[in-house]
Image (cartoon, grey):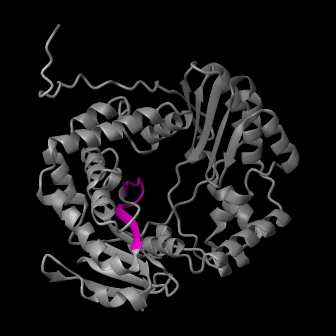
Amino acid sequence: MTHIDRSIQPTPGAAPIINLGTPVTHTLPNGLTLLIVENHKLPQVGIRLSLDECPELEKEKKGISDLISLMAGNGSTSISKDDFNEEIDYLAATLSIASNSVYAEVLSKYFPRVLALIADAALHPNFTGEDMEKEKARIIQSIRANESNAEVIMKRVQQTLRYSTAHPYGEYITEAHIAALTLDDVTNYYRKRFVPNNAYLVVTGDVNPEEVITLVNEHFADWQPFSEEAPALYIPENVNETQINFIDLPSAVQSEIRVTNLIDLKMSHPDYFPLLVANSILGGDFGSYINMNLREEHGYTYGAFSTFKTDKWTKGNFSIKTKVGNAVTAPAIREILKEVKRIQTSVVSEEKLAQAKAQYLGQFVLATERPQTIANYAINIKVRNLPEDFYKNYIANINAVTKEDVQRVANSYFLLENFRIIIVGKGSEIARELENISFDGKKISVKYFDKYGEAI
């Protein structure tokens, strides 16, 4: 019997290559780009229509895209909502239509009919005044119901403080915005924004590419393009020094905490994969530094996590998220900052690095089994200007990340000196402690804002 020395870590094998399939590409005269990825493992088809549109300020029309998302998918000008939904159910299809996207899954034998229904509903939506008023009422009711919801308030002010209301990502919906919207607003916005010249249609699964091209030309050829010059986006900036942004919510029983900064990073940048691993170690997984500290060591919270997002059009962001009891708000902030400093100043262990890679790669491999994931990847390669082999080499690129890479990107993108520490909580119980928070011997300033991100 061969003796195995279990004290020696096995040498890892070569990184597997995930073959997601090379899309067949076809562009219609109106600008619609069709991507077809064959996969005949199962008799099913995924359909994803996505718009690659630059965000624009909605200003006094803020909420129009949210309203359209609720009104979309209610049949077309040629088929009623009830008949449309009944046929979708009969065909055992899953369908979701929003203001800037459509997704469906269906058995391959029903694909031609479902594609026809999608085209009809998307190109000739059944927008009615009655439906509009009903959906406006729902949005307004939601706004009122969440007036004192700490998590909803945090979601709004975090975007407003990070990007400002001069940027589309920093705008927020009010009851007055929704009440003022008209059916003309809906139809005009849809006509100008839901257009083929910036659209991608991805069909994945058990299909014949030639048949798909024929069907798409048949159903989408009359889709009319529209273009107009978009105004330049406001360029948001990080704060000059780390600060606490506090929003007082007297009814709060816990403090919502976000520690965040903007990042200037695209998916095509070499730092993207090291940052995936660094984020996983800091706060991306259950066993991360932040979660083990706040949850397991101190018992401050049920969970604390970090994420980062890249963006094609503007700056992305990094954020740490948790909620804690009022009494431990200040200590939790100090511990979060301590863990950020730890990943910046101490090289991660080989074990921690290996765990982070294994966790992330497992999630990636599982995700590739879903048709919707394949569609998203195909679109990303086109709209994010990624190499054609970006996802094929994904695992190899993750495995290539070193301990030194992790420390380097942690210092470049987790901006310990430029954090916004946003807190929504009960001022009468936590404000005094927040005013006395110091880190590394330096007091952190506190600035006060209302529930809409306006300085007080």
**Residue closest to the eye, 270 or 43:** 43
Please, is residue 181 above or below residue 271 in the view? Answer: below
Count of number-bearing discs: 0
Split into 4 quadrants, where in the image is the N terminus? top left
Relative to residue 22, is residue 141 drawn left or right? Answer: right
Res 443 → quadrant = bottom left
Q: Residue at point 43% right, 83% down?
A: 247
Q: What residue sits 30% from the left and 47% below the top?
A: 276
The C terminus sits in image quarter: bottom left
User: What x and y, as percent, mark residue 226?
Assistant: 63, 53
Magenta residues, as a range?
308-324
Residue 80 visible to the viewer: no
Instruction: Identify which residue, 135 or 198, lies in the foreground.
Output: 135
Q: Farthest residue toward the top?
A: 1
Q: Is residue 86 left or right of residue 386?
A: right
Q: Residue at x 45, y 76 (%)?
A: 254
Expressed as whole percent of the image width and height from the top left, the position of residue 74 reads 79, 52
Q: Residue at x 46, y 76 (%)?
A: 157
Residue sitting at the far front:
1
- Give the main secondary structure, helix, strand or loop, of the magenta stretch: strand
Q: Position of residue 433 (x, y in %)?
A: 30, 87
Does the magenta portion include 399? Answer: no
Residue 156 lies, in percent from the top left, at 50, 73
Q: Is residue 400 visible?
A: yes
